[in-house]
Image (cartoon, rainbow, N blue to C red):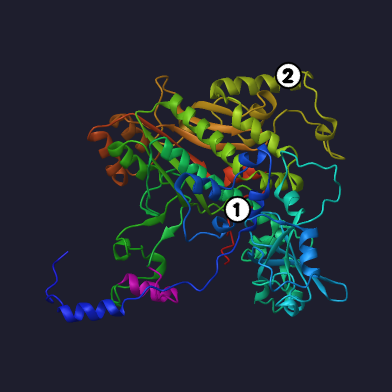
Amino acid sequence: MAALTTGAPTPALLKAALKKSTILETKQPRYERIGFLLSTLRKGDGAKKRELISAHLAQLYGKTRLGDVGDIHSGMKPIAYADFDQMRKSGEESKSKLPVISIAGWCKTVRMQNAGKLGFVIVNDGSCKADLQIVVHDDAAGHQAVAKCTAGTTIRVFGTLVERPPKDQSIERSEDETLEQVASKYEVHVSAFDGHLFEVVGENFDAAKYPIAKKFITQEFLREVAHLRPRSYFISAVMRVRSALAMATHIYFQRLGCIYLHTPLITTTDCEGAGELFQVTTMLENCLTLGDLSKKMASSDAKKAKALEDMELDYKKDFFKRKAFLTCSGQLSAENYTCSMGKVYTFGPAFRAEHSHTSRHLAEFWMVEPEIDFCDLPKNMDIAEEYVQFSIQYALDHCLDDLMYLESIGEAGLVANLRSFATEKFIRITYTDVIDILMQHEADFKAGLVSVDEKQGKPEDGAEPRKTAFENHVEWGIDLSSEHERFIAEAVFKRPTIIYNYPSKIKAFYMRRNDDGKTCAAMDVIVPRFGELVGGSQREERRDVLEASIKENGLCIDDYNWYMDLRTYGSIPHSGFGLGFERLVMLVTGITNIRDAIPFPRYVGKADF
């Protein structure tokens, strides 16, 4: 950067400028997060195992003065209800100095009792599934504001944390006590004590139309109000788990020694070669009609303008001077840095213009893609297994309450399955052996040796009995369908399974060809009741083999000159894989639709909010 040519300010100007410089102090108070509060109140050996991520990081790196108020109230003790009630009845509220706790959040329900003298407000701040009950006494500052509260109203409360009298003295705290169970033992009372206050921060001006007020809301309906659905217990739980899995991703690969790489979202190459990419162009800018586009392509020269149907788009007039697309993968870019800096990983958005309406596809999604130098296929499989298991265990350690809630409304046995996935060794088996197993099962089925569940195997009225075990034909060379993969992982091995050495013709051009001339060093991680989670390979590092593969796949070699340079100037063996992050979220949360695994889903016909 060039040096300034303005000259130095005078000492008098410097002194005046420093006087004008001020430090702004925030006027917003800090609030106790309900999740943090209830976690500190949870007792027993299990409490340490289910520590919030923020609390865990605070122990490692220290607390920040800009964080939530938990660091101030961490030593605060709740008051027994009998003691609090006695102090209120003594008439010494204004003289008594009680510890004050501050809570802010959104009302779930509101009810009045004792002819309006007592207000009971259930509040949630999104930090956990558990709600906290606020009891507002008739002598409290702001008692009249309770009448304005409805579901969705934003409130802030300054009161005293009170321990409710136990309903059953024989009940002891269990090691697996949930935050909701902890919340049932405490409430915040707002009375006439010094510092107590109940205040409405944001009123719900149309309570009758508030969509999250209903007791039962379908997931389909929530997708139509994606801007408000994080206030639902379901979506907020999924998003907290998603956040934990993102944190686990960074922790794992940083521990592995990887460098976090931001790969471009705009690219001129198709990593997968599928051609289902979103095109990026400014050619249509200021074009309201096809005639406008025709004139623009002809540089506004009417004499050179052709009929629109005969014109070819001249991308040299486009922003990037050539065709450009939104990326479907950061892998090829990551390989550039792997061949210079060693281990790297990308974690960012990817796009695919796939006209699919299934529950497992999105147009915009996030990908985790490590690239590891001097890594062959067996090591690549080990890293994929270790990463998946670490992420699952991290979610179990820090989001168990959310996972238990999601299990209660969804997949039975979710937590037990996750614990199994996090500890059991993944199976390894070749594609060829998988085909042999599938074909043998098909033969056994036709021979009548396979017992089929009566409910699942019974044909519909008027339908012919099943003649084959699989709906999709099985032979060597096919791309395994979901039913094939699930049969192997779910029925045969009953645990996550890594299938490797696929036929070269059904895999991407960059996957290393094996010496048999038929297969490549590719692998997929298949999970029971779910299907494919990870896809990866050892990359082709041999220049001549890679060039032949690009041509065999019908790709333009000129578009990959930069990729070929990595093999020209000091090639290295390296491997990597891709994991669709939303699929990992689906696996860990047990949800059945990928549109609920991302804050604002993008798919065919939907780009709202």
Q: Secondary structure at mark 2?
A: helix
Report the residue marked by disc 1: 75
Residue at image coords 30%, 77%: 300
Q: Is residue 389 above or below residue 378?
A: below
**Front one among 256 and 385:** 256
- For the C terminus, the quadrant is bottom right
Q: Amino acid at mark 1?
A: Gly
Question: In terms of depth relative to the viewer, which is nearer, 467 or 559?
Answer: 559
Residue 265 x %, y %: 40, 54
Left or right side of 21 for 12: left
Q: Quadrant of the N terminus?
A: bottom left
- Residue extent of the magenta highlight: 283-298
Residue 284 placed where, x, y %?
A: 41, 70
Could you classify mark 2 by the number of other residues whose Cα lies within 10 Å: few (under 14), some (14-19), or many (20 or more)?
Answer: some
| Residue type at numbered disc 2 | Asp
Residue 358 visible in the displayed image:
no
